[in-house]
Amino acid sequence: MANHKERQKKNLEDQNPSEVEGKMGESIKKKTKKKKKETHTVTMETIAENPNNISPIVGYFPSGYDPLRNNNGGVEELSTKLYRNAKRYNRLQLVVSPNGSQVDFVGTNYSGEATSAQLCTYSLGILDKETQTLKIVPIAANKIIRLEPRVRGLEVQETEDPDTAKQELTAEERNDKMRELTQTYSSKKSIRQARKLDSLRQQEDTGNQEEFDRNIAGAINKEALEVAVATDSARNIPPHDLDATIPQLAYPLDRIISKGEWDFLLDIFELTEAGAEMTPDLYPCFVCNRSYKLEHIQDEDEKKRLAGIFSFITHLVKFKDKHSMDGVSSAKHHKFPGILSQKFTSMFSISDSKRLPEEKLTLLINHVLVLTLFADDFRSDPSDIAKDLRINAVALRPFYEYLGCKLVREKNVVLATLPVPLVFPSVRRKRRR
C-alpha cells in the first residue's frame, strides 16, 4: 500500500501543473453544463369529430411486440384493417397483420378491456414545428384499443357481449338478482316491502299456490272492481252503498283500499313510531296538520288504519301532481309502491300525454275527499285538502255535494258531513225560454 501511494505521488509531481489545472477545469465545466430546453410558442387548434371521416385510432400491444424493431433495423411493414359493425355503427374492430406472419393482432372497442369503466377522455396531439401549431384531435370511440395476438385460421371464442348476456337472462333470473341486491344493499324498509311483494307474486312451487291465491284474493277485490266499473260509468265516484245506515259503510273503506295494499301504507306509521316529524314538502298539509291524532291513539291496529289512510291520501295527491302541469315538481322525488302505481295508472287511465283526463281527475279528487272524511270522523274542514289539490275551497264544495255530503257552518268554519242514507243531488238543467 505504501509503495502504491508513493508511485501516485511521483506521477503527479512529474506532470506539468498547468496540464493538471486544465483537466480539472474541463471536468468542472462538464458537470456544471446544463441542457437547454427547447421552447415553442404554438397556436392550439381543437378539431371536432367528423361523422363522415374516421378519427385516429390508438392501440397498444400488451404482448410486448414492437413493430419498430426488426432484423433489418427499419420499420416492419404492417397491414392495418378497420371493420365497422353494419347494424351498430359505433362498434369498431382493428386488425394489425405483420408482413409474412401468421399472427394477427385484433382489438375491439366494445369487448374485453374496453368495457371497463372509463373516467377520462383521450385525444391525440400533433405538433407541427414549422407552422408552430398544435392540433388536438379526438381518437376513435374514445378508446385505446388493446391488440391481442391471434393465430390466423384458428377460431377464437369471443367474450360475451354484455347486452347479449342481459337478453339471455330469464325473468326469474332477473328477479333473483334483484332480490339478492335488495337484500344486500337496500334499507330495512325496502327489504320488508320486497318480501311482501314476493308473497303476492305467483310462485312455481305448487305447495305455495294456495297461499298465493289467498294473498292475491285479498289484494284484488273482485266485487270492488265490479262496483268501481259500474260506478265509473254512472256517477264517477268511489264504490258506495245506498242502503248504508252509518257513514262508515256509505263508502266502504275495504273497497277503496284493498286488503293486500295496507302492508304498503306503513310509512307514516313507522315515522310516528320513530318520533320523526312530517314536513310539508314531503307530505300534504292535510296529513301534516292531523299527524297529532296518531299520538293519541293507543290501539296499534287503529293507529295503523289511520296512518294507512294518511299514506293513501299522500300517494293520491302526489299522483295527481305528477300528472298535472302545476304540481309536477312536488312529486318528482316521491316513491310510489309498485302495487299502488299499477292500480292508479289503470284506474285513472293515464294516456300517452301523461296527463289525467278531466273525468279521471274528478274521480281522483272524489277518492281523496272520501278518505278525508274517514280521517276527520266525517266532519272535515276542506281548507287543507283544497291547498293540496290546488283548488279553491269554494270551488271544492260542489265535489262534496256530488258525493252526497252536506256543508254545515260551526264557529265560522265550514265543515263537510256525510248524512245517511246517501242522497245524491239531481242533475239541474237550464230551462229554455
Image (tube, rainbow, N blue to C red):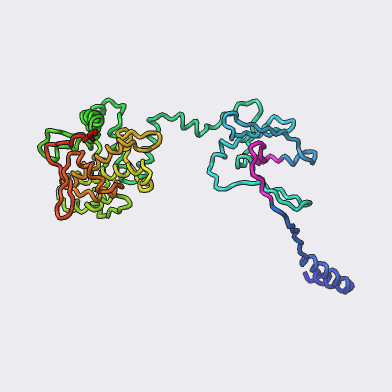
Q: Quadrant of residue 154?
A: top right
User: Given the current orientation, which residue lies at the most extreme left position?
Assistant: 245
Q: Position of residue 191 (x, y in %)?
A: 32, 42
Q: If the image is split into quadrants, where does the C terminus sit?
A: top left
Residue depicted at x 36% and y 42%: 324
Q: Position of residue 85 (x, y in %)?
A: 60, 30
Residue depicted at x 82% and y 70%: 25
Name the side, left or right, on which 387 lies relative to 160: left
Q: Quadrant of residue 218?
A: top left
Q: Nearer the viewer, residue 253 or 379?
A: 379
Q: Nearer the viewer, residue 416 or 64?
A: 416
Residue depicted at x 61% and y 34%: 92
Magenta-span inclusion, residue 76: no
Most common SS among magenta residues: loop
Q: If the image is split into quadrants, where does the N terminus sit?
A: bottom right
Identify the magenta region.
45-66
* Residue 114 visible in the displayed image: yes
* Residue 211 visible in the displayed image: no
Above or below: residue 123 compared with residue 6: above
Name the side, left or right, on which 76 lies relative to 268: right
Q: Position of residue 19 (x, y in %)?
A: 88, 71
Above or below: residue 175 compared with residue 118: above
Q: Nearer the viewer, residue 354 or 260?
A: 354
Q: Position of residue 418 (x, y in %)?
A: 15, 42
Across the whole image, how many numbered discs are drawn on residues?
0
Name the side, left or right, on which 275 lies relative to 119: left
Residue depicted at x 86% and y 70%: 22
